[in-house]
Image (cartoon, helix red, strand yellow):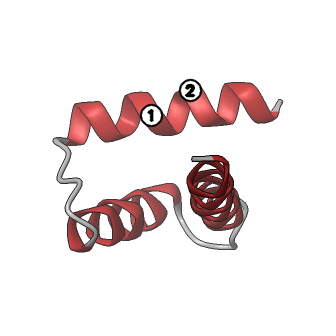
Amino acid sequence: MKGLNIALAVVAGALAGATVGMLFAPKKGADTRSDIKKFLCRKGVCLHKKELDDIVDEIADEIQ
């Protein structure tokens, strides 16, 4: 069970790191959000625009 928790933590950390990296990439915000939405949909997490905007705003607040 401990190994599973470590594996999940690594995956969650990688996803969070990728998200933060995309947020600071030199692209327009709309393009970045679109890229995040497409990435998450390919991984099976399809979100509506409002849900995605809420998540991105929450992450941005946590970073600052």
Taking depth in this image into account, of 9 and 25 the one nearest to the observer is 9
Disc 2 element: helix
Contact flag, marks 1 and 2 (Cβ < 8 Å): yes
Q: Identify the image quadrant of the C terminus.
A: top right
Tell me the crowding category of disc 1: few under 14, some 14 to 19, or many 20 or more residues within 10 angstroms, Cα based. few
Q: Position of residue 10 (x, y in %)?
A: 67, 61
Judge left or right: residue 31 versus residue 13. left
Q: From the viewer's perspective, is residue 42 above or below residue 48?
A: below
Circle 1: residue type = Ile
Residue at the spot 73% in from the left edge and 61% down from the top edge: 24
Q: Residue furthest right?
A: 64
Frontmost residue, 45 versus 56: 45
Q: Which residue is drawn at 66% across and 35% down?
A: 60
Which residue is found at the position 65% from the left and 51% from the top?
Answer: 9
In the rendered image, the vertical position of residue 48 relative to residue 15, given as above or below: above
**Left or right of residue 56: residue 13:** right
Q: In this view, does 26 lie above or below 19?
A: below
Identify which amino acid the numbered label 2 is placed on.
Answer: Glu
Q: Residue 58 carries which label?
A: 2
Asked where in the image residue 63 lies, by quadrant, the reply is top right
Image coordinates of residue 19 in percent, x first then y, are: 59, 58
Q: How far is disc 1 from disc 2 in space, using C-alphas?
A: 5 Å
Question: Which of the 4 quarters of the picture holds residue 39?
Answer: bottom left
Dot 2, crowdedness within 10 Å: few (<14), some or many (≥20)?
Answer: few
Residue 12, numbered label: none
| Residue at mark 1 | 55
